[in-house]
Image (spheres, rainbow, N blue to C red):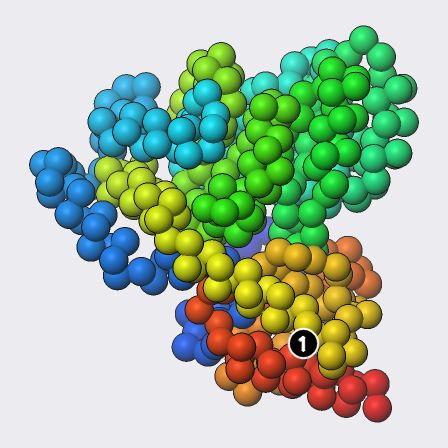
Amino acid sequence: MKHFPENLSAKLEIRKQNNALRKLPLSSKKIDFSSNDYLGFSQSEIIFKETHQHLITNNIIQNGATGSRLLSGNHKLYQETEDFIANFHKSESALIFNSGYDANVGFFSAVPQKNDLILYDELCHASIRDGIQLSNAKAYKFNHNDFEDLEKLILRNPNTNIYIVTESVFSMDGDCPNLEELVQLSDKYHCYLVVDEAHALGVFGSSGEGFVQMLGLQDYVFARIMTFGKGLGCHGAAILGSTELRDYLVNFARSFIYTTGLSPHSVATILIAYQHLKQDSDSILKLRENIISFNQEKNMLELKPLFVRSKSAIQSAIIPGNEKVKAIANLLQEKGFDVKAILSPTVPEGQERLRFCLHSYNSTEEISEVLRLLSTFVFMEHG
C-alpha cells in the first residue's frame, strides 16, 4: 500500500492530541438521547409496511432510479411526492434533493450571483457554509440571532441583491431566531430570506409543518429547506419556493443535476412519512410534552445555567473542554443513556457540550433519570 502523506498524518495526530479524533460509533442499544429521530418514524413498522404496499400497489418494482432526474431517474413517484410536500407546506413548489447537504450546497452555489451578497448567521450549519464557499457572491456572517448586527451589514451594502440565511432551529444550540422580526427586517430592505428548517420539521406546528408555517410566515420566505433525515425518519430533502425558483434549480443546481436520483423506495418512504405527519398528532404532542418535561426537570435540579435556552427537541448543556465533556458523556453511557459529547472543532473551543435530543418515545422517567445523573456527575466534577 502507498505511503500515507505526512502532512495528512500530522493533521490526524493533532486531532488525537486534542482528544478530538472522530470515529464511527456502532449503533447502541442504550436509551436514545442522541438521534435526530424525533418522532420515532425511522423505527415505525407501519410506515415501513405502508411504503412497501404503496410500491406494490403502483406496480413499482425497481431498486434504483437508474440515472439523474434529468435523464432517466425522474420516476412518477417524484411528482406525486413533490405535489404532496408543496401542498402540505403551502408552497408553490417543492424540489426533492438527495440530502439536506445536497440541497444547501445546490442552493447556495447556484442562486446568489457574482454581485449579490449573502448574510448568514454565524451558527449556520456546515452544509450552508460549504454551499456559500462555492458561490460567486460575497458573504459575511452576522452575530448569532443579532439583527442589529445584521441591519448594519445590510446598510453597508445598498443597491445589492441580499440573501439573509438562518435556521429555524439551530442544530447545536437548539434555539430559534425571532422570525417575525427577521421577516420585518428582510421586507424593509427587500432582501431574500432563506430558512433551513431541518430540525423544525415534525417538531413545530400543529402537524409538524415547521417553525415558519407555525408562525404563518411562509409567504415572506424566499426559500425553505426541509430535511427528511430528522423528524421524518427517512432520507432526502426538499427546497420549497416559487415555481420559478424550482425551474432555476433544475437548470443550475449542480448537486441536483449531476447525481443519480433517489430510488423509488426512498421517495415512497418520504411520501408515506409525510402522510403520517399529517395524521399522527399523537407523536407530535408527546414530543412537545417531553420538551416541557425536560425543561421543568432541569430547572428543578438547578441545571438551567448549564443549558442554552431552547424550546426545541435539542437541548445542549455547555461543559467546556473536550476531556471534561467526554468524561461526563462516558459516565452517562455507562448508566445506559446514549448522550453524545459535541467536541471542538465541531463547536468553538470553550463551547463543548452534551447534546440531548428528545423524542416522542422517551418516557418521563428516562428524562428525570438522565438529568438526575447529569446533576450528580456535574456536581462530582465541581466537587
Q: Is residue 144 above or below residue 359?
A: above
Residue that label 1 marks: 297
> Is residue 92 at all visible to an observer of this figure?
yes
The one of 262 and 166 positioned closer to us in this rendering: 166
Quadrant assignment, res 325? bottom right
Q: Measuring 70% from the left and 52% from the top, which residue is drawn there?
A: 175
Is residue 252 something that shows in the picture? no
Using the image, determine if residue 248 lies above or below residue 291.
above
Tell me: 96 left or right of 48: right
**Is 243 situated above or below 20?**
above
Give me the residue at 62% from left, 56% from top. Answer: 312
Q: Position of residue 11 (x, y in %)?
A: 67, 56
For residue 373, above or below residue 235: below
Query: Residue 303: x percent and y percent?
Result: 76, 75
Q: In the rendered image, which quarter is residue 256 located in?
A: top left
In this rendered view, identify the residue nearer to me: 283 or 271.
Answer: 283
Residue 346: image location, x then y, percent: 68, 55
